[in-house]
Amino acid sequence: MSTAAIFEKLALHAPHLPGKHVISALPAFIYGTAWKKSATPDLVYQALCSGFTAIDTAAQPKHYREDLVAAGVSRAIKDGKVKRSDVYIQTKFTSVSGQNPDNMPYDPKGSLADQVNASVMSSLKNFNFADVVPEGE
């Protein structure tokens, strides 16, 4: 499946604008997940249970653990604390200079377009909530 097709499947859509990606309003506060290490899933879960509806992360294993962020979000969804459709997840592309050379979500020798594509794909893989989100939500 292409990056575009995966994005279309996983991105939030405005029901009245089919195919259009719309953010009605960003929450006033976004919970940041950098430097949380192994505590990330529990802290993300606590943030969502405490009323946060937006989470910030990055495809940058040097400072973020997107897989653990996703684990915290998944737990909150499974426990009925939040619905996926009510949670804004912000991730970012980080260039080679900001990455750990031993742990990157893309090939540093690839073209910039290939790096961005691989980074986006790694984030989409981390945040694929197919096992916890009911179809149609």
Image (cartoon, rainbow, N blue to C red):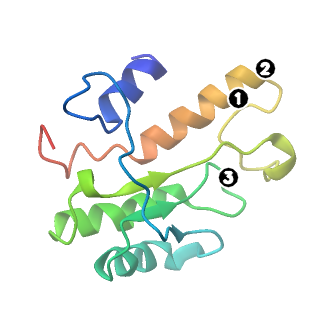
User: Please, which residue is most extreme toward the right here?
Assistant: 97
Question: Do the residues bearing badges 3 and 2 touch, measured as CB atoms within 8 Å?
Answer: no
Counting from the top left corner in percent of width and height, residue 54 is at 42, 63
Where is 38 relative to 7, above or below? below
Q: Which residue is mark 1?
A: 115
* Quarter of the N terminus within the rendering: top left
Question: Do the residues bearing badges 2 and 1 touch, measured as CB atoms within 8 Å?
Answer: yes
Residue type of the residue flagged with mark 3: Gln
Q: Residue at x 72, y 49 (%)?
A: 103
Helix, strand or loop status at disc 3:
loop
Helix, strand or loop status at disc 1:
helix
Counting from the top left corner in percent of width and height, residue 80 is at 14, 68
Q: Which residue is mark 2?
A: 111
Determine the image quadrant of residue 130: top left
Where is 18 relative to 56, above or below? above
Question: Do the residues bearing badges 3 and 1 touch, measured as CB atoms within 8 Å?
Answer: no
Answer few, some or many: residues within 10 Å of disc 1's Cα (few below 14, many 20 plus, some between 14 and 19). many
Determine the image quadrant of residue 4: top left
Residue type of the residue flagged with mark 2: Ser
Q: Residue at x 51, y 52 (%)?
A: 90
Counting from the top left corner in percent of width and height, residue 23 is at 39, 44
Q: Residue at x 45, y 39 (%)?
A: 124
Asked whether 97 or 86 is in front, the reply is 86
- If you read the primary sequence from the N terminus, does the residue marked by circle 3 or circle 2 appear first? 3
Q: Which residue is mark 3?
A: 60
Helix, strand or loop status at disc 2:
loop
- Say left or right for 72 vs 31: left
Asked whether 86 or 42 is in front, the reply is 86
